[in-house]
Image: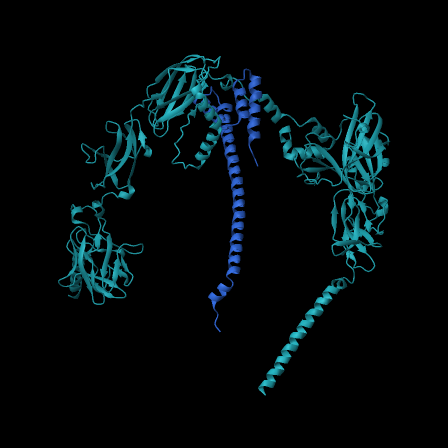
Chain colours: A blue, B cyan
Amino acid sequence: MSFNFRELFLRHKQLISYLVIIFLLFGIISLGIQCYFLKSQEKICEQREKTQNGNAKIINFLNLFIEKVLQSKTDISFEDRLKLENTVRDLNDSEILSLWETFTEAKTADEVQAYCKDLLQALVRKLNTN
Amino acid sequence: MKNYFSKLLIVFTVVLSALYGGCVFASTTQGTIDSTYKYAWGENTGFISFSTTGGGSVIVTDSDLTGYAWSKIYGWIKMNPENYGVKNNAEGTLSGSAWGENTGWINFSGVTIDATGRFKGKATGDIVGEINFDCDECKVITDWRHAGLRGGGNLPSGAYVPPEATSLSVSVNNGAVKTNNANVAITLKAGLEVKSMMISNSADFTNAVEETFANTKSWTLSAGDGQKTVYFKFFSQYGQASNVISSSIALDTTAPELKITQSQESYNSTDTIMLAGATEADSKVDLFIDNSSYTAFSSDNLGNWLINLGKYSVGSHHLEFTPTDSIGNVGKPTALDFSVKQAEIPTEVQATPPSNIITETITNTFAPLLNTVKDQLNTFLPGIIKPEEVTPAQVVVISTTTPDALTNKWALLAQKEIGSFVLSPLPSEIALIAQKFPEVQQTLSEVGVTTVADVSKLQGTTFKLPGITQTLAFSQVELRTGQLTPAKGIPIAQLTSISKSKIPSEIMFAKTGAGLIDFNTAVSINDKGNTEQRISTLTGNTVQFIVRVDGPANSVKGYLTFKSKKPEALSSSIPLNKLTASLLFSEPDLAKTQEQPIESATPEQILVVKQFDYKDSGDGVYTADVSMPVVSGEYGVITVVDYKDKTLGTKEMNLITVVDPEGYVYEKDGDKETRIAGAIVSLYWLNPDTKQYELWPAKNYQQENSQITDVTGNYSFLVPDGYYYLKIDAPGYLSYDGKPFEVTEGSGVHINIELKTKYWWLKIIDWKTVLLVVAVLLLIYNFYKDKVRDLILLKKNNH
C-alpha cells in the first residue's frame, strides 16, 4: 500500500483549487489593507513634510527680518530688501504678505511699531507646532 | 716580554677590528641591513631575518647580495650560492635566486630596493611560496643607496632622498574652481626637508627660478582666459628634487554679455510683460526699471532667462539689464525701451461670417471635453514625452527708494514698553499680599521674583498661606501649656483686639474643630492665569470662615456655590515655611471689586448651594460657621463685603473648598467592596513631648476617638498638623495597624481601609476550584490505573 500523491491531488483537485483561491484572496486583501495603511502613512508624512517646510520658510523669513530689519543700524540695502521681498512671497501666505506690505508702507513711528508687532505675532502664530 | 706581547695583541686586535668594521658597517655603496627592520615574512617560512650574527648578515652592494638570511623553520638561506645568487642592477632592482638546503631556490626578481633603502615586493620559491618584504609587520631596510643617487663626498645617507611626495600639497586661491583675476594666492605645504621650490606656468619649468620655500606665494597666471595649471617642484637642502606636482584653476576675466531675445516695442495696458534673453550660465542680472525700481533674477545653467514683469502703466518705459557672472565679472548694461498703450475696449460685437458659425459652435461645444481629455492625457504622459513647459520667473520689483519703515529712522519695537515690562515692579496685588504675609515677601525675594517679568517663574506652582494662628505668630506651647494637646489654633473669640488687628484684611481664613484647627490655604495659578485660594475639608464638616474687613461694613455675606463634582488637581503643593517654595499670583483675586451681585447671577453662571451671613466678632473681624455639603466635590465660597465707605465699594473674596468624602472601612469581595459596620477606628498621634504614639485627644477638638462605624462603614477625623496612624479592630476580621503618615495642614483623615477576614483562605475554595481539583485527581487516578494494568499485562505476557 503506497501513498500516491498524484491520485490524492487529482481526487481533491477542486478542493485544493478553492483553498488556493481563498489563500490568494486572503493575501490580496491583506496586501490591500497594508497598502491602504501605507498610503495613509505616506499622506501623513507628506503633510508633516509640508508643515515642516512651511515652518522652515517662516523661520527663515523671521530670522531675516530680525537680522536685516530689527538689528539694522542703517538703511536696509537693495539686496536685503529684495531678499526680504522674495522670502516673504515665498511663504505663499496672503495674510503675512499683506501685513508685510502694511508694515513697509507705514508712515509714522507709532504705525511702524504697531505693524511690526502685528507682523511678528502673525509669523509666530503661523508656525505650526502640531 | 710577556707584557710586550700583550700590547702587540691589543694593537693587532684594534687594527683588525677597524679593518673589519670598514668592510661591514654602514655605507651607501656596501650596505648592511638595519638591526630593527630586518624581517621578511612568508606564510610557509614565518619571519626570515636578513641581519644575523651566526652565519653572516646580508650585505647589499651595487652588483649583488651576499651573506645569509635565517629562517627558524628552514634554516640558513645563502644569498650568493656558487654560479648563481641574488643580483643588483646598482639601481635597486634585484634578480637571480638565493639557495637554502631546505628551501631550494628562492627567486628575487620581484624584489626592489627603493631610494630610501627599503626592500619592496615579494620573492618566490617552489617550497617556501611567497616571501613578503613590505607588510605591516615585516620590513627590511638597508643603508645601501642607488648608484645614481650617490654623489660621493661626506654627505649623510639621507642626502640622496628627494622630498617625499606625500608631504607635499599646493592649492591656488584655496582650491577655488574659478577666478576673474590673473593674480592668485598659492598655498604650499611641505615637509621639513624641503628648503627651496620652483613654480612655473609651464610643465617644463621654462625660465623658472629656484627660490626659498614659503607657505604662501602670490602668483600671476599666464595671459588669456581658460583653464590654467601651475606646476611646482620642491628641493631638499642637498638639491634632491621632488616629482612635479600641479594645481589648476579656471581664469575668466571676460565680462558677461546679455541679449534680449523676447520683447516687444509696444504693449497694451492689459498685457503681461514677459521678457526672455540669454547671458552666461548662472549669472545674476540686475534690472533697473525707469530708474525708480529695482529687481534681480538669475539665468539658468544654460544661461537662459525668462521673466514676468506683470502689467505696466501706460507710457514709455526704460529697462536696464546688468549681468554679473558667477565669479563677479560685471557686464555692460543692456537697455530696452518699450511703450505701453491703453488697451482698446471692444464696443460692438462684429458679425461673424456664416461659414465659421458651425466650426465655432463645434469648437465651443467640445472645448471643455477636449480640454479634459488633454489634461487627462497629460497626467498619463511620462515626463520625457511631455514638452517641457518653461514658466517665467515671477520677479519681485522693489522701489529704488527705501521705504521709511526700513530706513532705521524709527525704533521698530517700542523701547519704553519693553523696558517697563522688564523693569517694572511686581503688580500691586502681589506687592499687597507680600506686605500682608512676610513669608510671601521672603519667598519672593529668595526665588528672585522682583519684577513683573519674573512672574512667569512661579507659573504652575502652589503655595500655602499660613493659617490665622501662624499668621499672628502665637506659640502653641504658650497657648496650651500643661495640656496634652497638639492644638495650634486659637478660637477667634479668645483673640485680643490687638491680635485681631494683626489679621491680614480681605483675606479669607478657615478654621474647624471649634476654631482649634487652622486650614492652611493653598494658593495657585489656574490655567487661565488667575490665582485661586483652596482648602480641603470633609463632607458634613463644619468650617468656620474668618475675614477681617478694611473698614466699617454694612454687611458681610457668604455664598457657597457648586463648582464641579471632580476637584481639579493642584500642580504641586509646597508649604511656605520651606523656602524653596515658589509662588505666583500675577492677578490675585483674593479681594476684588464685585462686578455683578451674586443674587442676580443665573443658575447657569453660579449655582448657589447655601447663603450665609458673617457675624461681627468685633474689631472688624467677621466669622461664619458653615456646614459643608454631604455631596463631595469642589465648591466655591464667595464672601461679599459691602463697605459703608463708598470709595471702598463692594469687595468680593473667593475661596475654593474641596469637600472630600469621608473614609470608610470595607472588606473586598472580588471586584466589590462591602462596608464593615461596628469597626472601631482609633487614631494615634505622635506626641512630640514623649516621642510616643498616643491616642489622639479628639475631645479637645469636639470629636470622638475611637469611632465606631455604622452600616456605611464611614469614619473621619479633622486633625491639626502632626504624625498619625490608624488602628482598626472589627469582630471576625484581622486587626489593622496602619503605617504612620504626616498631616501637613488642617485636613481630614479619611483613608479607605480594607480589612481581611480571619478566615480569608476559605474564600479561595469555591465550588469551581473544588470541582477542578476533583477532576484533576480523577485524571491522575485514571493514568495510574492504566499504568498498573499495563504492568500486569506485561508480566503476564512474560510468563
In the foreground, B43 or B300: B300
Q: Is residue B382 left or right of residue B630?
A: left
Residue B436, given in percent of the width and then of the height, sits at 74, 31
In the foreground, B181 or B261: B261
Residue placed at 32% from the left, 19% from the top?
A: B332
**Quadrant location of residue B776?**
bottom right
Q: Which quadrant is the N terminus of chain B positioned in?
A: bottom left
Work out which residue is located at the far front of the displayed protein and give it: B354
In the foreground, B253 or B622: B253
Q: Is residue B355 visible?
A: yes
Residue A94, given in percent of the width and then of the height, sits at 53, 25
Q: Is residue B708 visible?
A: no
**Figure label count:** 0
In the foreground, A20 or B39: A20
Residue B162, given in percent of the width and then of the height, sits at 23, 43
**Quadrant location of residue B760?**
bottom right
Q: Is residue B434 left or right of residue B294?
A: right
Residue placed at 48% from the left, 66% from the top?
A: A7
